Amino acid sequence: MEKKITLTGITTTGTPHLGNYVGAIRPAVISSHSANQKSFFFLADYHALIKNKDKNLIYKSTTEIAASWLALGLNTDNAIFYRQSDIPEIAELTWILNCVTSKGLMNRSHAYKSTVQTNIEGNEDADFGVTMGLFSYPVLMAADILLFKANTVPVGRDQIQHVEMARDIAQRFNHLYGQVFQLPEVKINQNVDTLVGLDGRKMSKSYNNIIPIFASEKQLKKNINKIKTNLLEPGQPKDPDDSLVFQFWKAFAHQPKIDEMRDKFQNGISWGEAKKELFVLINNELAEPRDRYNELMSDPEKIESYLIEGASKAREISLPFIKEIREAVGINTLQKIKS
Ligand code: TRP
């Protein structure tokens, strides 16, 4: 049986936090160890350029995200892990796809529309701050997906439309030039939004409520102490289903331990005690990867070598395929036609 191809990108803006870990990285690491799946994970640094113009941040985030995925145990023998900008065929395909993508389709993109909406509400020109990069963001994403013939693309809800657009673009291309592209399917990553932030809203840098995955032990403890609770005293029964501390607990504990903590809540465990136990639980899972992370961060060349190896595996696929795509549209080596 042909192996199913799964592919997903991580935009290199920001420091990876526990929400990313629980929602995206941990499941991806698990799937990278599964023999009956072929997976592609990549650092979407071209996408990062759309959102952020701070070159130091892009560089720092690329290093941190790569180090995090590697430190957390991504199996790079089985999964292909690379940096988008190391694959020139992605940029090339983006142009080819631009030429079959209707502007009308891009006009419907949520990300673009919400910028326009904000502009209008703020009495700005509708196009204020809208770059061609933002406008055609879904085309670059379609190239990422279609170049590697992905069957499934696991993403959070905010990215569903982009995968659907990749499908539309592939269909349009196939209609014009023949069956070249595999149509991708979105796989909604149910876990993505499960981990809340310190204040109960979605964990996100823009809410300033994140816990970085590789905070030091001391920082992790401090962060956990900041998780919002209520005023119930030690000894008073607490409702686990109405507690952020318990939500974090559930994201890291196995079932028997979840049941145990549920009982402790009903028996009135103090918030201080519950948080202490939560710290031990999370820290146990992250302590070893943290050492590996710190080691990698002090040796960027080592990280680079993983990425170069990943890019070379990815290009074994993208190079012959881009040739096929070029031929499909009529960009070809000139030669005498044999009669
Ligand atoms: N745009 C995605 C995000 O912000 C990241 C991404 C880029 C991606 N290319 C992709 C995800 C291809 C899936 C497939 O989350």
Image (cartoon, grey):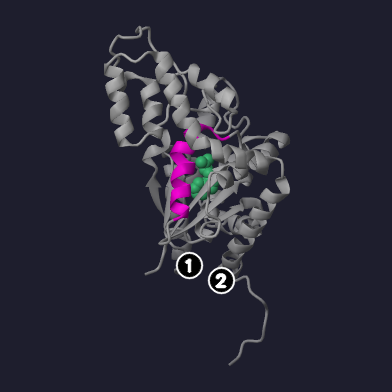
Please tell me which residue lies in front, 127 or 135. Answer: 135
Quickly name the residue at label 1.
180
Q: Is residue 242 above or below residue 158?
A: above
Residue 287 falls left or right of residue 1: right
Magenta residues, start to end: 16-33
Residue 258 lies, in percent from the top left, at 32, 30
Please tell me which residue lies in front, 175 or 43. Answer: 43
Kindly report the distance in space between the C-alpha atoms of the residues bearing marks 1 and 2. 8 Å
Secondary structure of the residue carrying tag 1 is: loop
Q: Is residue 59 visible?
A: yes
Callout 1 environment at 10 Å: few (<14), some (14 to 19), or many (20+)?
Answer: some
Res. 324 mark: 2
Residue 41 lies, in percent from the top left, at 53, 51
The answer to which of marks 1 and 2 sits earlier in the sequence is: 1
Disc 1 vs disc 2: Cβ atoms closer than 8 Å?
Answer: yes
Residue sitting farthest toward the bottom: 339
Q: Which image quadrant for residue 332? A: bottom right
Please tell me which residue lies in front, 55 or 225. Answer: 225
Give the residue at x 42% y 30%: 195
On the rendered image, what quadrant is the C terminus found in? bottom right
Residue 149 lies, in percent from the top left, at 48, 61
